[in-house]
Image: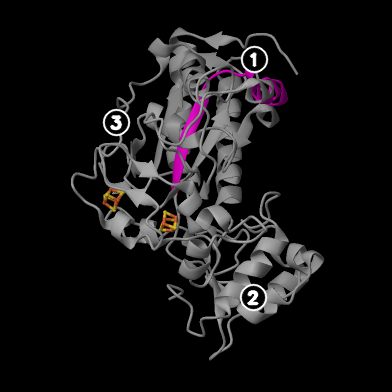
Amino acid sequence: MQGDAPPTLRGEAGALTARWLLFHAQEQGFFSYAVLEKQAWESVLLERGVVGGGVSETPHSTPAGRRWVPDDGAVEGRIGAGQARASQMVRARYGLDSAGAMLVVALRYASDVAPEPAAARAGRGLPPLPLPVPGKSVATIGRFARGNWYGEIGARLAACAAATAKQMAAAGMPFFPPKRWQRFSNSRFPEKALAVAAGLGTIGRNGLLITEAPCSGDASSAVLLGLLLLPFDIETASIPPRRPPMLPLSRCGNCRRCIDACPTKALHFGPQPTFERERCVQHYSSRVGALPALIETSWQDQLYGCDLCLEACPYFRPDAEARTDRGMIGGALDAESIAGMDDGQLRALLKGTSLDQKWIEPGALRRNATLALRKPKEPRGAQ
Ligand code: SF4
Ligand code: SF4
């Protein structure tokens, strides 16, 4: 799907639209937000090899989407012919040629989410969650995945799009149907690199984004990222000034708490964030197959989501006020029940949750629950 270049809003039209976007992002409760003109986000995609040449990302499902090891080249490789074809497909699939400016947002999630009651799930045709049974092993879920915060971000971005499109039309500007404003979260785009380019924060030694709120300077790494790709560009001069991109580790100093918290020594102390994907528990949690001995022996009770390096961080500050009613799976499930479910049962159970993703294989969740069975104890961090 190749398309024409998008129209560009200039002068007052561009300035008003950018301000409305940022206003509605704030209204929707996003912790941090900024607008990138097309040239700015395209530069990031080119640099990361998502389109065109450059270097590739390091895929790793994490609280902030795919983990990124920026610019040190330690675990990245030059893009090959196969990747070049893949990047052409990305460009075509998402209509990037005809896409314009981008709103980049960070949503702070809650420390915990209560599991959806069985009656409410039954009303939606879903089976009950196998909740923990006292004295039996539990399989825990990372804090970022206890509610479907990705879906929450998508819904809030849709509201931003609808409100901004309406104001634009009321001001005599062309109407851009909000359905054409593409939304992404936990996507194949380099969300953290885009957030850094947009001035939302810095990469910590654990590879995650430490995000800063506009004005207040509050910082939190308990965030998930989202992107709203607009069907029009906005000239740079019309976009309110952004904070300049921060260097990695700008908030870390000599801290090494995340490094010390990692059971597999996947993180290393140095002048750049350095992360060994092959030593990370989370890297394996969605993939079937035999586990390396180090990973298997280090596995605790995770069903999905290892929070250890995140929770160790002094910037891990979830939002006590954050709420979502989407995909409320809670912090722990009965490990034995999960280990005994077939693929169909697991898919039905997890429908609409943040674990309802193509790349999360039911067989991997069954194996993870089986590993958790080794540890009879109360849910970790499910208070
Ligand atoms: S603590 Fe270690 S194993 Fe767990 S997510 Fe962090 S880097 Fe991966
Ligand atoms: S725990 Fe310390 S070193 Fe690790 S990301 Fe947080 S501030 Fe940086």
Residue in the picture at 36% in, 42% down: 274
Earlier in the chain: of badge 3 and badge 2, it is 2
Q: Position of residue 19 (x, y in %)?
A: 43, 25
- Label 2 packing within 10 angstroms: few (<14), some (14-19), many (20+): few
Q: Amino acid at mark 1?
A: Asp
User: Which mark, by number, is residue 273?
Assistant: none
* Left or right for 15, reference 339: left
Q: Which residue is mark 2?
A: 117
Q: Which residue is mark 3?
A: 246
Please tell me whether mark 3 or mark 2 is closer to you in this view. Answer: 3
Q: What is the C-alpha distance between the residues marked 1 and 3?
A: 28 Å
Q: Secondary structure at mark 3?
A: loop
Q: Quadrant of the C terminus?
A: bottom left
- Label 1 packing within 10 angstroms: few (<14), some (14-19), many (20+): some
Earlier in the chain: of badge 2 and badge 1, it is 1
Q: Is residue 55 above or below residue 346?
A: above
Q: Amino acid at mark 2?
A: Pro
Residue in the picture at 61% in, 21% down: 169
User: Which mark, by number, is residue 97?
Assistant: 1
Q: Quadrant of the N terminus?
A: top right
